[in-house]
Image: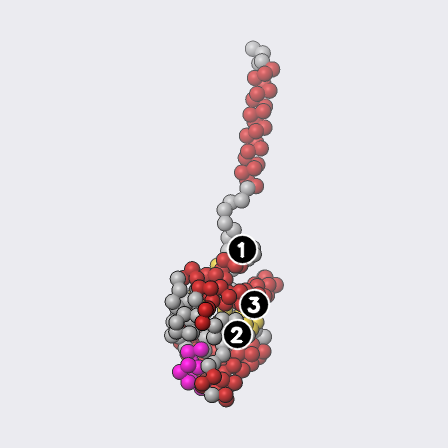
Amino acid sequence: MTKHPIIVIGVALFILILWMGVGHTQNSPAGPQASSGTIVCVGDSLTAGQGVSESNAYPAQLSRKLEAAGYHFKVVNAGISGETSSGTLSRVNWILKLKPDIVLLETGANDGLRGIDPAVTKRNIEETIQVLRKNKVIVVLIGMRMVANMGRTFTASFAALYPDLAGKHGLILVPFLLQGVAGDPSLNQPDGIHPTAEGYRIVADTVYPYARAAIDRFRRQQ
């Protein structure tokens, strides 16, 4: 029995449309891109985001900023309020269990407020850095400054420990986490120490270029 030409053409068109549809489906985005690596933000209450929601803490705001720029990295907030540099050192092996490719290390401010000798703080931070680097983690060291009433010698020694360690170990250094935020009542909570959500947005902006530099370094090492 001879097939009608119209039926043959119709079947051919159906197959062509089906083929095009399958091809389109295979080439279409499959959803959110997979993470390219893991950034762990280590620190005290300034990292944890004390006084604001988790989504407004600087790590979360940094994560959104990186994602919007096409940097698909998982960002983990591993901040603990009240932590000192000795506390950070004591949990460094736990931090490694998070499988970080990059660590943004912010610690020492609580040491300074408690009057701990900056030499002790420096030693704790250095040991933390050494453990992380031994495990192939890229470290971004985040500098802090101390309030003036701790005395000129103390504040100078405290401020110097961050660039000293960054230079010695070849680390990326954020000069001061609270640049443009510290001392501004409109950007800080009533305690005058912890930023507001808007203050943390500025903190995320401050950290952002250094996080990007760390990502670039990470990619070069792949």
Going by the numbered disc 3, the residue's amino acid type is: Tyr
Q: Earlier in the sequence, mark 3 or mark 2?
A: 2
Amino acid under label 2? Phe
Q: Say which label, 1 or 2, has the lower sequence index.
A: 1
The magenta-colored residue range is 109-119
Dot 2 corresponds to which residue?
176
Q: Which quarter of the rendered picture does the C terminus lie within?
A: bottom right
User: Which residue is depicted at the point 56% across and 37% down?
Assistant: 24
Image x and y of residue 21, in percent: 55, 33
Whole-angstrom CA distance, mark 3 to mark 2, is: 12 Å
Q: Residue at x 50, y 49 (%)?
A: 32
Question: Residue 115 versus residue 12: which sits nearer the camera?
Answer: 115
Earlier residue among tags 1 and 3? 1
Label 1 neighbour load within 10 Å: few <14, some 14-19, many 20+: few
> Which mark is drawn over residue 210?
3
Mark 3: secondary structure = helix
Asked where in the image residue 54 lies, by quadrant, the reply is bottom left
Q: Is residue 74 left or right of residue 214?
A: left
Q: Nearer the viewer, residue 23 or 149?
A: 149
Query: Is residue 35 a member of the stretch shown in magenta?
Result: no
Q: What residue is disc 1 on?
A: 68
